[in-house]
Image (spheres, grey):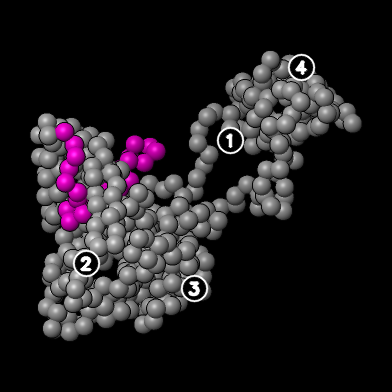
Amino acid sequence: MNTVVAIEPSEVTLGEKGLSLPLNGEQAYFNYYWLRDNCLSSFDSQTRERTFDIFHLDGAPVPQSAAIEGDNLTVLWAGDGHISRYPLSFLSEFSSAKPRHDPADLPRRAWFADHYPNMARFSQAELKADPQKVAEWIKALIVDGVAIVSDMPDTDAALTETVELMGHVRPTFFGLYFDVRTHINPTNLAYTAKALELHTDTPAEEHAPGMQFLHMRANTVEGGRNLFLDGVAVANDFRDLYPEEFKLLAETPIPFYCEHDNYDMRSHQRVIELDQHGNVSGLTISQHMLDVSDLSQEFLDSYYPAFCRFGRMLQDDKYVMKFTLHAGECIVFDNHRIVHGRASYTAESGERYLRGCYSDRAEMRSTYRALVSEGRFK
Ligand SMILES: [Fe+2]
């Protein structure tokens, strides 16, 4: 059983709770539990899941011996005599407590009002035919937060097919899909021909949906231009210009609601959202779904001016991209980042029909990682 040879105590030092070894010119320390739990044999090659059960060890894992053999650290465990071999490259990845490399953690590129000609575009056919194009599409959605899919067939199925290239349709409390056209008894401003102020969707949900898909099926009306802006671009500028007000908007959860005869959805959200690096990742904003504030009236003395200044900044021509989404196009965007609205239109002037749905950002990033990286098991 004991095949560990060439033990050189000067190379690996066994301590009480972990061992040290030279790695990349420094001494690196590894905890024994971590080593035992992450032995390559702990993972089933077929399911790729950990099958080792560290909860039921007889005692704390302790090596009988350990040595560097070529490009591996070999550990002979006391008790069961199990032998673990760890590639030094694997140990290097975890020797300092840096988050594991994530190919989907791409820096965002802020964009401004002139972004329309530069917006990433893909035809549905090329996305369906080529996984590399899907990777490029998702990359644009992570970096820019918005892209257009063109040449969409005029069918309900076309929208589902596009979503399923990156994930699944994710329901909201309105259901799986929504149809935006003028309604006789509207329950939502979107279902009228009036202007739709700049907003992110369903802020009253505990977890507002991540990616939004709007498939223009028909658009022959006068007016109704689409308004899109990058919340990251505005919030970054706001941070530079008004750091104290930025802090208020990034730290204070405020109430949102959506209420009608059969639903009463409520949540508290921060207007400016930060990611794990402290960078702006997006916004939650909607005046028509902002609830009556339950914050202290004294606090509102500071909050409201900041909120209004930010709301006005969102409408600045520097940021708002104005264009017409044509029939057959589907705009896909990050609902936590891209703020959108619509100019009013003349309902009698033609037909306007937009069909939409949502999917999940985490699922989109998962698809991206699977497309572009090796992962741990390939
Ligand atoms: Fe919307």
Q: Are marks 4 and 1 in contact (CB under 8 Å)?
A: no
Residue under label 1: 93
Given the current orientation, which residue lies at the most extreme front position? 261
The correct choice, above or below, for 282 with respect to 246 in the image is below
Residue under label 3: 128
Q: Mark 1 is on which residue type? A: Glu
Residue 9 - label: 4
- Classify residue 349 as left or right of residue 116: left
Residue at 24%, 57% in the rendered image = 259
Bounds of the magenta segment? 274-296
Q: What's the CA distance linking mark 3 and mark 4?
A: 57 Å
Q: Are marks 1 and 3 in contact (CB under 8 Å)?
A: no
Depth order, front residue of 375/305: 305
The percent position of residue 326, horizontal first and vertical second, equals 26, 77
Q: What's the CA distance linking mark 1 and mark 3?
A: 35 Å
- Classify residue 210 as left or right of residue 82: left
Q: Mark 4 is on which residue type? A: Pro
Q: Mark 3 is on which residue type? A: Lys
Q: What's the CA distance linking mark 4 and mark 1?
A: 23 Å
Residue at 13%, 66% in the rendered image = 195
Q: Are marks 2 and 3 in contact (CB under 8 Å)?
A: no
Q: What's the CA distance linking mark 2 and mark 3?
A: 36 Å
Characterize the local packing of mark 4: few (<14), some (14-19) or many (20 or more) Cα atoms within 10 angstroms. Answer: few
The percent position of residue 227, horizontal first and vertical second, equals 20, 63
The correct choice, above or below, for 158 with respect to 307 in the image is below
The answer to whether the residue bearing label 2 lies less than 8 angstroms from the nearest atom of ligand 1 is no
> Is label 1 in a helix, a strand or a loop?
helix
Residue under label 2: 187
The correct choice, above or below, for 101 with respect to 158 in the image is above
Depth order, front residue of 62/252: 252
